Image (cartoon, coloured by chain):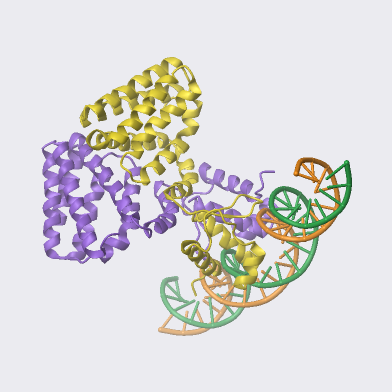
Chain colours: A yellow, B purple, C orange, D green
Amino acid sequence: MTGRAADSVVKAISARIRSGILADGDLLPAERDLMAEFGISRTVAREAVRILASQGLITAKPRHRPVIRTAGFEAAFDAAGSIVGNLLRQPGGVHNLFNTRVMLEAALVREAALSADKKDIVNLKTALAANGAAIDDNDQFYQTDQQFHAVLYDIPGNPVYPAIHRAYTTWLAPQWGQMPRLVDRNRVNFASHTAIMDAILLRDPDAAEAALRSHLADAWDQVRLTFGDI
Amino acid sequence: MTGRAADSVVKAISARIRSGILADGDLLPAERDLMAEFGISRTVAREAVRILASQGLITAKPRHRPVIRTAGFEAAFDAAGSIVGNLLRQPGGVHNLFNTRVMLEAALVREAALSADKKDIVNLKTALAANGAAIDDNDQFYQTDQQFHAVLYDIPGNPVYPAIHRAYTTWLAPQWGQMPRLVDRNRVNFASHTAIMDAILLRDPDAAEAALRSHLADAWDQVRLTFGDI
DNA sequence: TACATATTTTGGTCATACCAAAATCACTTG
DNA sequence: CAAGTGATTTTGGTATGACCAAAATATGTA
């Protein structure tokens, strides 16, 4: 009556996952076993597997047994990833997405300035120091740059934000990855990070936001220099 | 060689969609036609259709011909929807998601206070007036409430934000929908909306953010009153 | 014990068939 | 001629059975 025969199988499996009978990392039963257990055809069994994969409850690499995955918010952004990939290819797509990042990070640094605790400050200082030490190593700088921003996403203690950060870096990687890496740019970016850090230490949200916006506006200028108007 | 025979079909179809050969609202060729065109089995044809659907390029209702849909950012959040649904069912899930909403809307009202133009102000006033006129009609108030917030998401002129708003309202609807609707609550909420509006008119981002946070904190208290700690 | 090899398992694909719901066509009727 | 109605075709959903190649596993050998 519901239309999809695979739905009942999906429901059963996802219940099994929630209840812990199937734990993270376990293998999903083979398709032929699912047929026997649920009295369905292989067609429906495969359909069920596909649906579970699209819901992030399992990861299904081709030619490999599907593996149970306890879904986090990352999985949600993974699911959106391929669609976003299309959207980024259309005019203004990258800019629109990048602007949301600017707004979110602006809010995050305000939050950091207002309520970062000792541990957060230590994390920021550590990340900033690592970033500064990597100015001469472009790849290393790229990594520590991301790490510095990642700390900002961690401060609120809300697991949604790190997931968003991962999504941003994944989605925008095609652009960032092709940007020329220059030590001079690294120096500028490190100075920007330092300015943001200083404002947070001064507990000045307005200054922190201003520094962050300046930093990301500068980054966007670099993107436009590389790609033209996109 | 990559493993998935359906991938080439997906690529061909999505290219056709991007190039406009298949426009929004068109019907996807029948599975049997895809078989003939691409020289594949029906299994693969169906697989391709499923992938296209998961990428938001088509909508595939059971027993209906798949329809081409020019994907917007809404489609991305749709894809994430089922996963988020799972996450909301686990402890703290709703709270975490709601907090991201608070932070985003706080940023949005700051933005509105700083850069809303005449048209935006008119839209806000219109929405607020409609909200005020609906205080005695709970359903109508619920709608105009959402509409008022929607205007905030529209102001930056970035299509990502309205998509986020739709996602929030969809994902949190199970909670909001079950909340008791009371005229007294409507009155309080309308007052909150007015306070936000006033701060925006005064071009005072701090006051606007404070009013918005107070409003949503109050809303969250109501949720907890109804559902307990979730 | 470690490594190379044979065997089994399992996912990916194809071909065919049947059913029921949609969509379409043909026909009647007001 | 338009609207409604019934018959026909199209099309998606599912079931079987089979074959291949890649993984996973077992086996035998050095």
Residue at the far top in the pictured view? A184
The answer to which of A94 and A76 lies nearer the viewer is A76
The answer to which of B203 and A164 lies nearer the viewer is A164
Relative to A97, is B21 above or below?
below
Residue A211 visible somewhere in the drawing: yes
Which residue sits at x=59%, y=53%? B48
Q: Quadrant of the C terminus of chain A?
A: top left
Relative to A225, is C19 above or below?
below
The reply, left or right, for residue A107 in relation to residue A178 is left
Residue B52 spot, x, y in % from top left: 54, 52
Residue B144 image-quadrant placement: bottom left
Relative to B38, is A134 above or below?
above
* Total numbered labels placed on residues in the image: 0
The reply, left or right, for residue A44 in relation to residue B220 is right
Residue B99 spot, x, y in % from top left: 28, 48
Residue B181 spot, x, y in % from top left: 19, 65
Residue B3 spot, x, y in % from top left: 67, 47
Residue B135 visible somewhere in the drawing: no
The reply, left or right, for residue A170 in relation to residue A203 is right
The reply, left or right, for residue A100 in relation to residue D1 is left
